[in-house]
Image: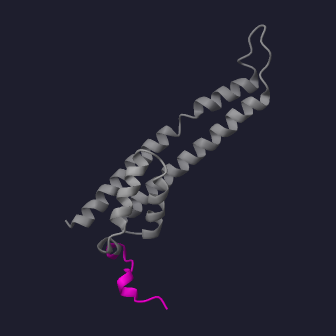
Amino acid sequence: MNQDEEHLRLLSIFHYVVAGLTALSGCVPFIHITIGLMIVTGRFDGPGHDNAPALFGWLFVIIGLFIVAMMWTLATVLFLAGRRLSQRRSHLFCTIVAAVSCLFFPFGTVLGVFTLIVLSRPSVKLLFGVESDAKRGPIA
């Protein structure tokens, strides 16, 4: 097996692993959503305590839902990129996902940097069917 093919196979596996970790960490904000709903419904109110403002509870719920949606979207995109890497398809999509994953320290950063390094090789571009810059000639 070629070294480039082996690197793409490993990157594909690591994309699946990081996607799973991202989806799992995307479940943490459910704690905030639960607390927000308890504030809104008055479950935290005890004798002699004033009701917490409902707006405060709704902020917990909305921000928690937003974070869950973002993390699960990222997990889905990472999973799709892993799939595309194994199929040698969508070079640009995989490059964009690798660049975005660099924002998520530490696992996403390591995965993104290594993916960008591998995807920038001319021999890997050929595996994806992407024309290299040398074959296109000068820009007219």
Q: Position of residue 35 (x, y in %)?
A: 65, 26
Q: Position of residue 27 (x, y in %)?
A: 53, 36
Q: Is residue 134 magenta?
A: yes
Q: What residue lies at 37% left-to-right and 77% top-to-bottom?
A: 129
Q: What residue lies at 21% left-to-right and 67% top-to-bottom?
A: 2
Q: Position of residue 64 (x, y in %)?
A: 63, 37
- Can you say whether 138 is above or below 128 in the image? below
Q: What residue lies at 52% left-to-right and 51% top-to-bottom?
A: 74
Q: Position of residue 137 (x, y in %)?
A: 40, 89
- Can you say whether 111 is above or below 41 in the image? below
- Residue 137 visible in the picture: yes
- Residue 90 visible in the picture: no
Residue lying furthest left in this view? 1
Viewer-nearest residue: 113 or 98: 113
Q: What residue lies at 39% left-to-right and 81% top-to-bottom?
A: 133
Question: Bounds of the magenta span?
Answer: 126-140
